[in-house]
Amino acid sequence: MLERERETFFGPVDDPARTLVAEREGRVVGCVRVVPASPLPENAHVWTLEGVAVAPAERGRGVAAALLDEVVQRAAAAGVRKVSLRVLATNPRARRVYERAGFTVEGVLREEFVLDGTFVDDVLMARRVTG
């Protein structure tokens, strides 16, 4: 089994500049990390979203939508062609947020995870940005 511990949110290979933070009244209410899909130059036109998170008290108030909109705007400005993400099939609320932001399902990894003894699908979604 692989174990990973972190003393801070950012590890030695994480670039804080790749994390967008949403604030309300001086409090962090959400964040999303944006990373290259891979280190290959042939794949540089794709960004991947990791760890979209919104504070529980802020859910349903447009924080995730604002973060996703900002990512898409920055991607377009950078000439990125596609933004992708992965979401668990057991998270329909997040899927609806992504769908409203223009993301569509590109594939499903069947039984990719085991959560509480149950196999769960991992849904691959993406949004075309430019081109």
Image (cartoon, helix red, strand yellow):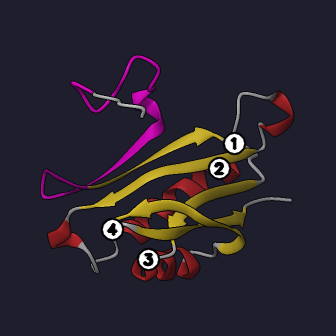
CA distance separating discs 1 and 4 = 23 Å
- Is there a contact, CB below 8 Å, between mark 2 and mark 3? no
Q: Which residue is labeled 1 in the image?
A: 78
- Which residue lies at the image location 76% right of the left edge and 45% below the top edge? 79
Question: Left or right: 65 with respect to 76?
Answer: left
User: Which residue bears the numbered disc 4?
Assistant: 63
Quarter of the image for the N terminus: give it.
top left
Q: In the rendering, which numbered label is found on residue 90?
A: 3
SS of the residue under disc 1:
loop
Tag nearer the camera, 1 or 4: 4
Report the magenta residues as a range: 6-29
Give the Cα separation between the discs numbered 4 and 2.
Answer: 18 Å
Quarter that holds the C terminus: bottom right
SS at mark 4?
helix
Q: Which residue is label 2 attached to?
A: 75
For marks 4 and 2 on the same chain, the one whose residue lies earlier in the sequence:
4
